[in-house]
Amino acid sequence: MSRADRITASLLLAFSVAFSAGALKFYKYWGHDGPGSAFLPFWLGVVMAVLAGMMLFRRPGEIEDWLPRGEARARVLVVLGVTAAFIALLNVLGMIIGTVLFLVVLVRYLGRHPWWLTIAIALAAAGLNWLVFVRWLRVPMPEGVLWIS
Amino acid sequence: MDFLTHLGLGFSIALTPFNLLMAVAGVMVGMLIGALPGIGPPSGVALLLPLTFGMEPTSGIIMLAAMYAGTMYGGTITSVLINTPGESASVVTCLDGYQMALQGRAGPALGIAAFGSFIAGTVGVVLLMLVSPALAKWALSFGPPETFALMLLGLTTVTMLAGDDPLKGYISMVLGLMLAMVGFDIISGDARYGFGIPEMMDGVDFLPAAIGLFGLGEVLAGAEEKTQTAKTKLRLRDVMPSLADWSRSKWAIARGTALGFAVGVLPGAGPTVASFLAYTVEKKVSKTPEQFGKGAIEGVASPESANNAAATAAMVPMLTLGIPGSATTAIMLGGLMMWGLRPGPMLFEKNPEFVWGLIASQYIANVMLLLLSTLCIPLFVRALRIPYSILMPLIILFCVTGAYSLKNNVWDVGQMLVFGVIGYFMKKLGYSPAALVLALVLGPLAERALRQSLIISDAGMGIFFMRPISGVLMALALLAVAVPVVRAFMKK
């Protein structure tokens, strides 16, 4: 834990210095009648720097294994990766095709359910999602290659 | 009487078929969300909020408030049956609830929790109805300094109570405020921290952030474990508590209700704190404290009443002052602003149909909760059998569609993804996503109040301490910062 905390504290410290400096450089600290748009950001940066400094210098706690390893890490990364790909391809594939592919890949990977069940879940969820958001709530979803809106 | 006309107006709105349907749907979804481990009330509100965009604000808040009440009970089901709290306000229910289940008394445990929740929820609404208008009237006299001091108090108390490590809580809160600075500044017209990206002009939207932090973040953390579905071999025979159960629980319910409401009204201390406190108090006043932890029904009745009373009470500061006391009410407050309402004391005067429709619907939601929780428990138990491997991808799908439907663009979905990763790390490292979301929602409002105060002030920051109300509030806010610091020194 202590190492993870030190790294986060250092990052936060750097971030807060840049945040405050950026505020003073680009925006006005004090306008003609009161505080400008840099006023609060500047002080927030200062407060964050103090907090990060406190964390950096406090007595380190015991070292804990907080990052998952092996299979657990793989599962988190796959879930994250598949979700990121789904979002990145949303405008290309469209909501319906994207949803079906996303669910088939992830449900199969996580559960090893039989193919028929996996595909049935994906189709049902994509259909229901489309019904609720597009038909009922009239939210235009990305059409992508499939023309349905 | 003025008051009865308002309540009549409220019921006339709450009893329209659509709003009635929303209350039922809210309770059902809430019970389901509460029962599912991994997603709790804040994620539930964040995920349901996009569904309300096309509705009247009143219908929207009716659904969200009913859902909040439903989650409080849903968490109980899993606490009692499989010793796994569905959300944090039911953690303490595991202690005696699961023991009761092992003794074959799962039915009465769930039953007394249902009745306790109903009684506490209903009393909570009565109190909400009586307290709120007066509080709103008083708050009308607040100027920018009082508003700012109140927001600061809300932020510091939530942070103080957020987790085990106050320093990390404050870091989360200040980070939320910093993120709230991004985007178009209304007073000067500067586009702060935009880096020339047009989408950044709008700033960091709280909804994708909340969906990411609570929805996706939780799912990612849950993905680490290869969970099998929880199986319960316990049978539910009779949900009705016996007469003996009642006589043991009646004062526990009463104490839980009173305590829960009192705690819930305070900013920062929500249902979770209330349930823990209620359990502790019950054990203290009990003549047979040795039975606690071994299946004492008071140990279920009291915290379960307290968390429902607190969930109702949490609406008081949100509706009257525009200050949310928890992550869940913070997201609701964000919803209010999205629907185009201005939260704060004026809400009672300008939108009586909204406020009173909500109050009346809370009465209805409590009745629904009692009916559903006594009649449909087997249904919810079955829902628990859906494997996590299917549930998890579906929750992510809901996160994506929810974030997209905000403004119909993929940028927000990307924002949701980034916050999902941030939420995962915050959870792993002991930071507080709740404090971050609260700060993100309150940030712009607090900044406006701060700058307006300093414009009218001729004593700089002194203005906050020279006016009586803001002075007291500021002192309390500083106290909330000082307490953990002093405690840290005492330890050394």
Image (cartoon, helix red, strand yellow):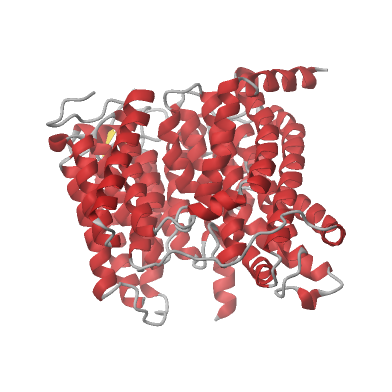
Would residue A37 be visible to someone looking at this image? no
Q: Which of the 4 image quarters holds residue A107?
A: bottom left
- Res B373 seen here: yes
Residue beneath the point at 60% across and 57% down: B77
**Residue in the picture at 26% in, 58% down:** A114
Whole-percent x and y of residue B289? 80, 75
Q: Position of residue B281 (x, y in %)?
A: 77, 65
Front-most of residues B79 and A31: B79
B471 is higher (above) or lower (below) than B55: below
Give the answer, above or below, for where B308 lies relative to B389: above
Q: Position of residue A149 (x, y in %)?
A: 24, 23
Q: Position of residue B238 (x, y in %)?
A: 72, 56
Task: Identify which residue is drawn at 66% across, 45% down.
Answer: B375
Q: Is B186 left or right of B310, judged from the image as shown? A: left
- Figure quadrant of the C terminus of chain B: bottom right
Q: Nearer the viewer, residue B358 or B446?
A: B358
Q: Is residue A143 above or below residue B206?
A: above
